[in-house]
Image (cartoon, rainbow, N blue to C red):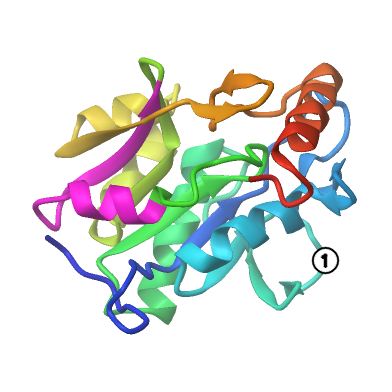
Amino acid sequence: MPQAETEEHTHPAWPAVILAGGLSRRMGRPKPALHLGGQTMLARIIGRLEPQAGHIAVNLNGAGQATIDGNPVIGDTVPGFLGPLAGVLAAMRHVAATTPAATHVLVVPTDTPFFPQDLSQRLTEAMTTRDQIAVASSGGALHPLFALWPVSLADDLEQWVTTDPKRRVRAFIERHPSVTVDFPMADTAGGSFDPFFNINTPDDLLQAEEWLRVLGENGG
């Protein structure tokens, strides 16, 4: 199994990048700045990711700032707002430059505030070779933006992003060795829900507030 540096060898500590550069068309305002339970969405994602990651960067275009809460901001390395895979590519390039010993980078989006707290650990444990992409799933649905990506795929991904007209994440994953890791539903006093529930609309934000209330102030 590939290994990242660990703290006392107790948990995976891959470098991580949060994809925060989406256009948020359905929401009508930038998702990273949405407030949920008294925190911005981005701050909540950072807080949930910190125990799982070696260091964190934020992929955000046109931010006008070098860091957010002490975490470096990185823009896409290819022009034109070419979708989430451009953010994954930026993550790979960033890690190759700053953490050359890391074989993989953990990528998560900014609109999914309840993702599992053992995400990194379980994805890491599922990998058997250094060239695998480890991808999360739940309830029979694949979540390709929650994945451990081999940094070595950067050149191939750049070719794909700049030449393939559709730039589908799943289609790129299918070109390479991968492993899927299924996560259970989150059980609460108010019922169960998908931990990869993502916020795309104002109604989704209201639902997230309700789940946050059921889970408690810290979101589970």
Residue 41 drawn at (x, y percent): 77, 47
| Residue at which label 1 appears | 64
State which quadrant residue 25 falls in. top right
Q: Is residue 137 magenta?
A: yes
Image vertical order of residue 31 relative to residue 104, above or below: above
> Image point 38% across, 34% down: which residue?
163
Q: Residue at x 80, y 71 (%)?
A: 65
Magenta residue span? 120-138
Q: Is residue 83 left or right of residue 167?
A: right
Find residue 81 and report its horizontal and vertical position in percent. Answer: 63, 40
Q: Quadrant of the C terminus?
A: top right
218 vs 89, nearest the viewer? 218
**Res 133 seen here:** yes
Tally of numbered tags = 1
Farthest front residue? 189
Q: Helix or strand or loop: what does disc 1 sit on?
A: loop
Name which residue lies at 19% across and 32% down: 175
Q: Nearer the viewer, residue 179 or 170?
A: 179
Q: Nearer the viewer, residue 210 or 2?
A: 210
- The residue at 54%/28% (across/down) is 187
Quick one: quadrant of the N terminus? Answer: bottom left
Residue 144 lies in quadrant: top left
Kind of residue at disc 1:
Gly
Queried whether the magenta region covers residue 112, the answer comes back as no
Q: Is residue 31 left or right of residue 135?
A: right
